[in-house]
Amino acid sequence: MAKWLNAKIVKRTDWNDHLFSLSFECADFPDFKAGQFTKVGIEQNGQIISRPYSLVNPPLANHLEIIAVPVQEGLLSTQLHQLNHGDNIKVMAPATGFLTLDEVPASNNLWLLATGTGVGPFISILADPLVWQKYQHITLVYGVRYEHDLAYLPLINNCMKDKGNQFNFVPVVSRENSPGGLRGRIPELLASGVIQAQVKQSLNAQDSQVMLCGNPDMIQSSVNVLTAMGLRKHLRRSPGNISMERYW
């Protein structure tokens, strides 16, 4: 049964003036799977204002972590943006969600397609040893508006260093040129084959699984492109290639 637990902020990371991560301790939080989400909230006047956030940390970490942006006129996100070390928050247990490795079939290639804060569950998945055992090649495609919106680059760069040819990272920036990254939008770059050429990996129904998270427009457009390429949505009752989680 879902219940609210008390948690305390132990670390805050500001990636830029609006993108931030909060780490918090919650000793009673139960085990979860990489890729799952939970609700985070603030108690006010006897009520808890909350919304779902993916857990960025790996399951065995000694803290929980989320990534967020303050949404103008948002009831919660602007308040979370003001929190710092030692502040109290609420977190709902247990975590839930099906964007997890045990829900995705094994394959040669695993493609992780994210925009904005949708990178969160994939950071958790990349820190899970299971992903490196289950897939021969893993590609993270991370779309943002501006280069400074790319978060968790130290962790991503460590993956590139430690995993060698097993891991590829493709930053996609839509509103400016970025050294080392692609200019444009993920669906169009997939349709043209630019991303596949960049990492020298195939993307097809025979040997690929695709996980998507983030902006619903990106997800729907990418699904349209992938479907035209012969891939189809993955369901337990009807195995396919495409698994997704929309952020709103």
Image (cartoon, rainbow, N blue to C red):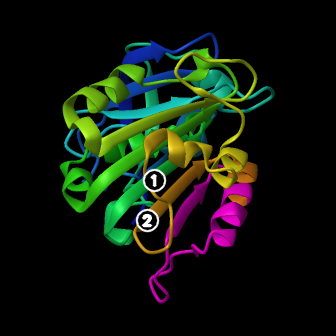
Indicate whether residue 226 is drawn in magenta.
yes
Q: CA distance from mark 2 to mark 1?
A: 7 Å
The N terminus lies in which quarter of the figure? bottom left
Q: Quadrant of residue 105?
A: bottom left
Pinpoint residue 150: horizontal percent, then vertical percent: 54, 23
Horizontally, is 158 left or right of 17 in the view? left
Q: Quadrant of residue 155?
A: top left
Residue at far bottom of view: 237
Q: How many residues crowd mark 2 within 10 Å: few (<14), some (14–19), many (20+)?
A: many
Horizontally, is 230 left or right of 197 in the view? right
Horizontally, is 63 left or right of 2 in the view? left
Q: Which residue is mark 1?
A: 111
The residue shown at (27%, 25%) is 158
Circles 2, 1 touching at the beta carbon (< 8 Å):
yes
Indicate whether residue 228 is drawn in magenta.
yes
- Give, as a single range, the part of the protein colored magenta: 221-248
Query: As shown in the figure, which amino acid type bears the numbered disc 2?
Result: Ser
Q: In this picture, is 13 found above or below 42? A: above
The secondary structure type at the circle numbered 1 is strand
Query: As shown in the figure, which amino acid type bears the numbered disc 1?
Result: Trp
Pinpoint residue 95: horizontal percent, then vertical percent: 39, 55
Q: In this picture, is 35 found above or below 168? A: below
Pinpoint residue 6: horizontal percent, then vertical percent: 37, 37
The residue shown at (61%, 43%) is 194
